[in-house]
Image (spheres, coloured by chain):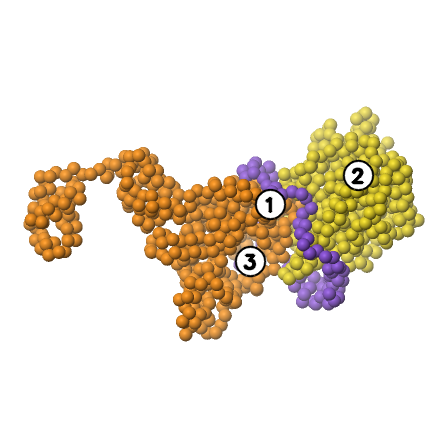
Chain colours: A orange, B purple, C yellow
Amino acid sequence: MKNYIPVIGLEIHVELNTKSGMFCQCANGMHEAEPNSQVCPVCLGLPGALPVPNKKAMEWTIKIGKALNCIISKHTKFDRKHYSYPDLPKGYQISQYDEPIALTGYLEFGKNHGTYKNEEKKFRIHRVHLEEDTGKLIHTGDDTRIDFNRSGVPLAEIVTEPDFSSSSDVKMFLEELHTIIRYLDVSEADLEKGTMRMEPNISVRVVESEKLKAESQSTDFKLPNYKVEVKNINSFNFVKRAIDFEVARHIELLEKGETPVQETRGWNSEKGITYSQRTKEGAHDYRYFPEPDIPPFNFSNEYIDEVKKSLPELPSTRLNHFVNEYRLKPIDAFILTRDKKTADYFESIATNEHITNAGQTVANVIINKKISTSLSVEAFITEFLKLTKPIETNRALLDTTVSSILTANKKAVTEYKSGKVTVIMFLVGQVMREMKGRADASIVRKALEEKLQV
Amino acid sequence: MSDTKKLTKEEVLHLAKLAGLELSDSEIEKNSEQLSETIDFIKNLEELDTKGVAPTNSVVDLSNVTFEDGEKNERQLSQDEAFSNGKNVKNNVFVVERII
Amino acid sequence: MVLGKTITEIRNLLKTKKISREEVFSFFIKRIEKYNPNINAFLTTLRKPESIVSDGLLSGIPLAVKDNFCTKGIRTTASAKVLDNFIPPYESTTTSRLKLAGYELLGKTNMDAWAHGSSTETSDYGPTKNPWDTSRSPGGSSGGTAAAVSAYLAPAGIGSETAGSIRQPASWSGVVGLKPTYGRVSRYGVIAMGSSLDCPGPITRSVEDAAIILQAIAGKDPHDATSASVPVEDYVLKMKEKKTYTIGIAQEYFEGLDEDIKKSLEEAIKIFEKMGFKTKKISLLSPQYSISVYTIIQRAEVMSNLARYDGIRYGNPRSFFGSEAKRRGMLGTYTLSYGYYDAFFKKAQKVRTLIINDFKRVFKDVDFIIGTPTPITALKLGEFEKYSFFGELMDKFNEPAAMSGIPAISLPTGLDRNDLPMSIHLMANYFRESDLLNASYQFEKETDFMGVIKKGIANLK
């Protein structure tokens, strides 16, 4: 019998939020600006204009590479990639072909990661390179309208190996990548605004039933003879759904003995389907050659180390740090480390001199929103101490309440005495309710236990 | 290597398509001849041994040339200037026939 | 009073108030009105002087500028109908610097369309005629500037060279042409032909004028990442120092020369020897290989640099491209296309390294290499049609310098049996423009270029 395993690779574009463009000084990130108002001869592709690279954009791409455990190339350059489209002013995109800034990295996912118990997983990064963005096209009526403000914005492109065999893994990976990019503070990485774009490349391979388990773990297999690229996906949920849709579509075709057409498809989120956009006849002939207007780059080990040192503690490291240092439950550590600000906030509180060994409690309070995180750290701590102050228990009131609760709940008492000890929680709850919360739960429990022994 | 076969019409049209050029029938014929002639000539480079020789992408002895992010933009064009040579401009955008 | 004067001489007239800048300007405008309809050197001319810098190196001096330099607010076409009505909203660095030096833009000159050619015949606006014989080409691609300077429709001008496009028209038109080291002068604002090859440079009637213009335009430009940080010397000062040099003579550069040209080259060598220069026999890679290297790399860069002309932001549609542009674009596409890159483009880049190393080796022993920028004198208009890569074959003596980026200067040496100008050229190592100018200045003092430049005035009646 035949079985099918999805083969998925990812292409992610991240718009770097530098102040200037990739090859000119035009302001970046001016989303509200009038169309074609943030342009110059360079990014408008006027005759005679020349590109000069943005130093920060190069640095930030190295940062991304390092965060993804890549090897940073000591020698890198730009290349011209030729194709014809109205949003591409020069008729070629300045990109990187055979000597990208970063190569062969990976992202690992440990058992602590996520909202469910994961196996340890590792996904390989093929490369990270730097290029320029195109203008924006809007299609209305009989026209296509072009705004070149976005032309020339720096774009980091991250390409993974086709290591993914499940859409859940893809979603997990992309969410983590998104978190990392935000930690690095190199991009807004806003999926709706398009400052982070994700394109899965999907195919399905066939394996014999007996080999299924072993095969699904393997990354060393013969790639299918086709792949389909899906564009226009602007949420993590949609990525999963688009992949699921595609995989099902491919399997249906393969069952019929047909090979899915190699092409680019668009995701229609309303209908929940993909549709054909244009055929990828083999590969485009981009006629790459080294960009003659830009001298190459040589990075010293010292420089690369300097950039590496400027990296913040990354989310997964932080997560493990929280679990080990503050003894948090992995799921809580995961939630807190989804953005750097929250993680920093938590850590400032947990390490405060007034807080001792209360990491998990602090985490609970933050996660369950018992105290607002918009408060300053000092204000939060004040509220926290108030909240967690052990409650003065009126001993006399406690005794009488315990007695009356035990009297009113004879069935529970019987159950307890016959060995069902967990029923004590119910009884604690009853007492607490009766005392309107003005009792320390552990003291209440002790009092009940004492009374029940009798 | 043997003499270059004259490029076929299909090959010439394929090149023209990639290069975004339109050729008349006579241009196709002429180009087919001339391209083949030129290709024949430039093959003389095969006579030279370039084993172990690095390609020169640029004759300048420069590297790591960049500009500082956030530098003042002295070359920003006004919208008028940006549109001054466009043939079809409406409501501050360049307009072409719809492509998708 | 102005007729035939060099920049230096006109500057003196202006400084001593013997003439005003308006008078100087209108002198040239009148000559252009009279002679340009016939020789078609200028495509666009200005009406009056407009500079606001009164004490610059070039104040009051009108110059002809090749029409591939973007001049803000003034039509710039690269002699191509695709850019028929293109008015750049920005200024090239070269003309910005000329402006800072106080120059007056006289007009934009005709060229081979997109600089693709060596005869100015591929211009979409008709060829420029050689003032020495109007049935002949002035050379190209900077033919308009060379003809204008030769016929004194401008005292000097700016051209650009990708492989011979300054030296060869300077030779065919009988004037001085300087190709600086690649990167010495910024390419920002020059409509690109061969990005790794293009060099803006002066075309003049004296070596000193070339030095003055180079002084004004050379230097690092933050808008051009390939522009050199090497400090700009005082070219005029260094030009006048007492120096002797060693000149290398390579047999490979004597092959296929017209008899008269060969003779004038040999005579020039004797003159240098008489001036106290040494000579040395050297051997260089055959220029035949440079033709291939140049054809492959240049046409690939051309294909790429023409990709931006889609008629959307500027210009006419691509159907307006002429046949030469199409031809070059097609070969460029071929050599870069999938499967052919290694065999052609990459191979050419490797041979380029061999050519560079060849010159490096030779320049350890000599200061200059002597030769001629062209094996023949001015061809009759229409003759180039016979060749499928006319320009590249014709420019074989210029291509090695182009591929390696080294500087070179073309100097008139007399007239041939048809009364057409001949020249020699000197090539030097990177950034040795002051030595080139120095040796040339001495040659000029010694020979007055055999009277060629002065005689050229009389060509147009």
How far is disc 1 from disc 2 in space, using C-alphas? 32 Å
Q: Are marks 3 and 2 on the same chain?
A: no
Q: Position of residue C183 (x, y in %)?
A: 69, 42
Amino acid of disc 1: Phe
Identify the secondary structure beneath mark 2.
helix
Q: Decide which of C369, C185 is in the foreground and name it.
A: C369
Amino acid of disc 3: Ile
Q: Position of residue C296 (x, y in %)?
A: 71, 55
- In the rendered structure, the answer to whether residue C7 lies left or right of residue B70 reads right
Graded by Cα atoms within 10 Å as few (under 14), some (14 to 19) or many (20 or more), the crowding at tag 3 reads few
Which residue is found at the position 43% from the left and 68% from the top? A4
Let me know if residue B45 appears in the view.
no
Mark 3, mark 2: which one is toward the viewer?
A: 2
Let me know if residue A109 appears in the view.
yes
Amino acid of disc 2: Leu
Question: Quadrant location of the N terminus of chain C?
Answer: top right
Which residue is found at the position 45% from the left and 69% from the top? A206
Q: Are marks 1 and 3 in contact (CB under 8 Å)?
A: no
Identify the secondary structure beneath mark 3.
loop
Chain at tag 3: B
Residue bearing the label numbered 3: B99
Which residue is found at the position 51% from the left and 42% from the top? A305
- In the rendered structure, the answer to whether residue A261 lies left or right of residue C310 reads left
Q: Decide which of A382, A361 is in the foreground and name it.
A: A361
Residue bearing the label numbered 2: C436
How far is disc 1 from disc 3 in space, using C-alphas? 38 Å
Mark 1, mark 3: which one is toward the viewer?
A: 1
Residue bearing the label numbered 1: A297
- In the rendered structure, the answer to whether residue A344 lies left or right of residue C94 reads left
Q: Are marks 3 and 2 in contact (CB under 8 Å)?
A: no
Q: Decide which of A10, A101 is in the foreground and name it.
A: A101
Chain at tag 2: C
